Image (cartoon, rainbow, N blue to C red):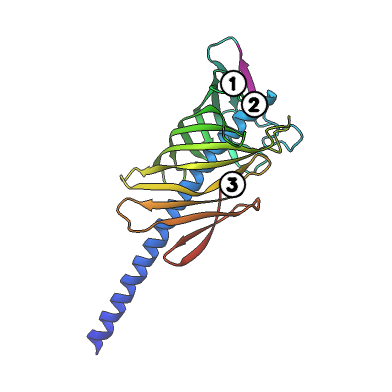
Amino acid sequence: MAILALTLIMTACKRDKNNATEVDEDTYYADDQARMDQSFNDAQTLADQAYETGNVQMKGGPSILGTCATVTRDTTSTPRKITIDFGSTNCLCNDGRLRRGKIIITYTGKYRDSGSVKTIGFDGYYVNNNQVLGSKTITNMGKNSSGQSYYSIVVNGMMILSTTGDTVKHTATRTRTWVKGESTTLLSDDEYRITGSGTNTRASGKVVNYTITSPLLIALNCNWIKEGVIAITPAGASSARTLDFGAGTCDDQATINYNGKTRTITLR
């Protein structure tokens, strides 16, 4: 009886450990993807604002960054260049995120012009003490069949996490469609739908594939992804986890769904 009891206890402990590992991995996968999406989307939003207004404050909307950043333009170089400089020490921006370092944007033409290309890079750039590296290239593809401007996006990036020092490589190929606000001069009413797929690779070599199964909604007057679903599938896994950003509410909450279980996470 004692041996049987010990065996049952050991089995239960092993099961609990496996469940805990599964939960931790799900959280890592979702956190990695959410951080990447937030950081690279933020960088594009800031680049758009700097290009349109010459600063990082929305026309007709609240300032995201307050006095955190200095924007400089080089209109004589080819391609043209804009630098958003947050300084060498952390600045708490109005969206609640700490930033330091530089975002550097080069562009070949106006954002609204078909064929124009914008490339976003980084120089010692950190968000909430996580270093963001690599590049994001946005190409204006003209109008779709609904008369909306749409953009091809290619991301080759990496993040160094402040809490662990781990590196996560991030690649993405996406389409960004301007679904609201294109006809106005305001930035604060702009909204985009994003589709596409990519991979995240941790330093351990673990590869995680992801596909946007319900388009992400990015609104320039919201600090978070408002809605959309991403299917996250670790290499070799038989089924996907889903990261669900909700149904249009501007908040920092998302859910992870896997094997019939749902957990809520707070976005950063």
Whether residue 198 appears in this view of the structure is: yes
Q: Identify the main secondary structure in magenta.
A: strand
Q: Which residue is mark 3?
A: 225
Secondary structure under tag 1 reads: strand
Secondary structure under tag 2 reads: helix
Q: Which mark is residue 50?
A: 2
Give the side of residue 262 with respect to residue 67, left or right: left
Residue appearing at x 33%, y 76% in the figure: 12
Quick check: marks 2 and 1 in contact, CB under 8 Å? yes
Residue appearing at x 41%, y 58% in the figure: 24
Q: Which portion, as a residue range, is magenta?
A: 70-75
Q: Which residue is mark 1?
A: 82
Give the side of residue 17 with respect to residue 37, left or right: left
Q: Which mark is residue 72?
A: none
Give the distance between the C-alpha atoms of the residues marked 2 and 1, in whole angstroms: 8 Å
Task: Work out whether 258 lies above or below 55.
Answer: below
Q: Residue furthest bottom?
A: 1
N-term-proximal mark, 2 vs 1:
2
Secondary structure under tag 3 reads: loop
Between marks 3 and 1 in the image, the one whose residue lies nearer the viewer: 3
Q: Residue furthest right?
A: 60
